[in-house]
Image: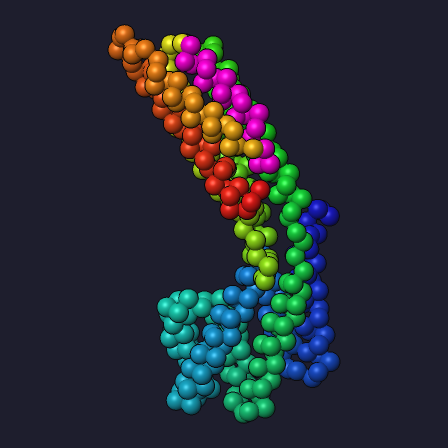
Amino acid sequence: MFKYFDHKVIKTALASFLAYFFADYFGIKYGLTASIIAIISIQATKADSIRVTIERFLAVFLGMSLFILLAYILGFQYITLGVFILLFMPLCIKLNILQGFLVTTVLATHILSEKSISLTFMLNEFYVLILGLFVGNILNLYMPTNSKKIDFIKKNVDSILKTILIDISESLKCNCVSVNEDKNFKSLKSTIENGRKFSLLDYDNSLFDKCNENLNFFSMRRRQYRILTRMRACFKRLYITHEYSLIISDFIFEVAENIEIEKKTSPLLAEHKELKLLFSNFPLPKSRSEFENRANLFQLLQELEEFLNAKIEFKKDYEI
């Protein structure tokens, strides 16, 4: 049970208490509403908190103006609330401020209960809103970093990538597929997406000094994953083990050994260029099956070039 007591649960409980406490301390009516506003202001990221706060401010301004107008026309009747919701909800959807709909509706019910739109009471409603939003946003400034988790996922991605490349290298030599091939590809995909999820959380929690290096790292690895799936398709069309296959196999093994981001890729790209030149100087194939095999090997070589370029482009962006 204690594993569910994370920072968000603690912040939600604290927000509820503080908003109600300060409302009571300053003599603000409807302190429970301030408490609820504080609770729903606790968001997954700081960026979400700011966005939702802006939506609610705009919604309350428009909604309360509309409700006051309806109250003057229809009076403080139950039908007034129904007409208000009938008009206000589509407006919120149209303006994409639905996050503020419930808060505004609750504040509108206060006016209906009090049967008053005096300046004093409207100020009270403003204080309720400000107090709830302020407490929720202040508490939401604390967000634990996911940097250690992201670093761990990065290493895991590199490890799976290395395993897949080594398996491809071995498969080219023996013309067989690893029994763990499908499992490794699925694991790589899910691990990359998991890394992107935590990187996006950290990015949204950085309000001023935003850095998208981790996000772009996982985008780069996702691009490499797609390249690997194409390489996998190429390999499945190979059915002859030839000296060309062995040469490419050795090169793929080198790529696997240098998969980590801090390891140099330029020498591999230079070697790849030499390999393409060597490949073009080989004698022409003598049969259709040999021709198809050679074409698939060349396609494999092309995919490897894009695989290496993905890493080089990423490193250039961050001067790694």
Q: How is the image coloured?
A: rainbow
Q: Give the range drawn in magenta.
A: 243-263
Q: Position of residue 171 (x, y in %)?
A: 47, 15
Front-lying residue, 302 or 105: 302
Q: Where is residue 10 in the image (x, y as percent from the top left)?
A: 70, 58
Q: Residue at the spot x=46%, y=15% of the render?
A: 247
Tell me, yes or no, if residue 53 can be seen here. Answer: yes
Image vertical order of residue 24 relative to residue 151, above or below: below
Q: Residue at the spot x=52%, y=84% of the render?
A: 111
Tell me, yes or no, if residue 78 can be seen here. Answer: no
Q: Does the magenta stretch include residue 246?
A: yes
Q: Residue at the spot x=41%, y=86% of the render?
A: 69
Q: Is residue 301 magenta?
A: no
Q: Where is residue 215 in the image (x, y as percent from the top left)?
A: 53, 47
304 on left or right of 111? left
Image vertical order of residue 99 relative to residue 244, above or below: below
Q: How many numbered badges does the structure rendering display?
A: 0
154 on left or right of 17? left
- Quadrant of the frame with the C terminus: top right
Q: Position of residue 23 (x, y in %)?
A: 68, 78
Q: Residue at the spot x=42%, y=26% of the render?
A: 273
The image quarter containing residue 239 is top left
Image vertical order of residue 119 relative to residue 294, above or below: below
Front-lying residue, 190 or 243: 243
Magenta span: chief secondary structure: helix
